[in-house]
Structure formats: structure tokens, C-alpha cells
Amino acid sequence: MGVVERLLATARGELGYLEKASNAQLDSKTANAGRANYTKYARDLDKLGVYHGKKNGYAWCDMFVDWCFIQTFGLEKAMEMTCQPMGGYGAGCTASAQYYEKAGQFFESNPQPGDQIFFGTSLDNSTHTGIVESVDTKQVHTIEGNTSDQVARRNYALSNSRILGEKIDLNKVDYD
């Protein structure tokens, strides 16, 4: 299985996971559903020291993406692939998009499966992110965390002005 398919398999396996009301039952996809931003993604990344502080209870779309990369490729490779330093200011869409830009891996067109895609009004105001699952002539199809308080698929017109850009195409990088 290739790099992209491995990442997408991890993300697809999380479809239906619901945000939790508290730190209880984080490993269940549906138990303790709520709107308090508690997830197993933040818990697991907090344990690894991925970010500059504890993140459970915060918006988690970017944490979901980071978790998928780490689960799929391991901590060291995932941090390299997402252009983040350990203990950095990831876990936020703006910081993550800026890490890619600083590394020369942020592109404003041509999303590809496996890309991390960012939404917002500017690179300094990225408000949401997900993983590109597929692209057709008119739409980009994503798997996202923290969309309606769950992990779910979404579709966007390629012309959507809120699409800021995406990271490097994983099909062009050998991480195996």
C-alpha cells in the first residue's frame, strides 16, 4: 500500500468519531458525545509532547490530521512530513499552514489525495483543515475532524474562495 493510501486508510478508520463532553470514554467512537472538544487525538498527542502545551478541550481539526500522520508513519516521520518541530505551535490551522509555507511546501492550487488542505481568509487566518481524500474536475473531497463535532467527509467546489491551499503532494515524496 502506498503512502497516500496508508494515510487515507487511517483517516477513513476514524469516520464517525464524535467529539466528547469530557475526558471520559475517549476511545469510543460514539460514547460521551458532546461539544467540549475532548478527543483521543488531543490526548494521544499530549502524551507524546507534540505541541507546546496540552490541547485537549481545544478545537481539534488540525490535531486530527496530525494524529492520522503519526498513527500512519510514526512520530519522527510525521513531524517531518507536517513540517512541525516537536513542542511547536501546531494544533492550530494557522500555525500548521505557516509551517508548510516556511518549508516551501504550501501550494495554492492542484490539491491531491493525501494533502492537508486549509480553509480560511488568509494564511494568517486559517480556520479549518482536513485531509484530501479525492479530487474530481469540480470538487475536492475531504475527511475532516471537528466538522459538526465529528470526523466526517465533506465536499467543496474547487473554486471555493475559502480554500487557502494545501501541503506538498505525498505522491511525489518517498517516505517508505
Image: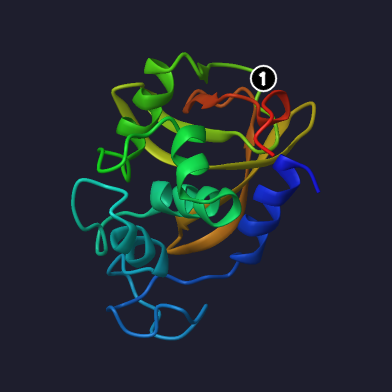
* Identity of the residue drawn at 79% across and 26% down: 137
Measuring from the top left, give residue 62's x and y in whole percent: 41, 46
Q: Please report the residue visible at 26 percent of the width from the left and 38 percent of the height from the top.
A: 88
Is residue 70 depicted above or below 161 in this figure?
A: below
Q: Secondary structure at mark 1?
A: loop
Q: Quadrant of the C terminus?
A: top right
Return the x and y of residue 160 as percentages of the image width and height.
56, 27
* Residue found farthest to the left: 53
- Total marks drawn? 1
Quarter holding residue 166? top right
The residue closer to the viewer here, 155 or 19, is 19
Occupied quadrant, residue 37: bottom left
Q: Residues within 10 Å of mark 1 (few under 14, many from 20)?
A: few
Identity of the residue drawn at 66% across and 31% down: 170
The figure's colour scheme reads rainbow
Disc 1: which residue: 110
Q: Nearer the viewer, residue 12 or 161?
A: 12
Name the spot of residue 51 as percent of width and height, x first: 27, 47
Q: Viewer-proximal residue, 153 or 173?
A: 173
Q: Residue at x 53, y 26 (%)?
A: 167
Q: Nearer the viewer, residue 23 or 34?
A: 23
Q: Amino acid at mark 1?
A: Asn
Give coordinates of residue 29: x percent, y percent: 52, 77
Give the quarter of the image for residue 123.
Answer: top left
- Left or right: where does residue 167 sit relative to residue 126? right
Residue 74 to residue 114: above or below = below
Residue 127 vertical placement versus 5 (above, below):
above
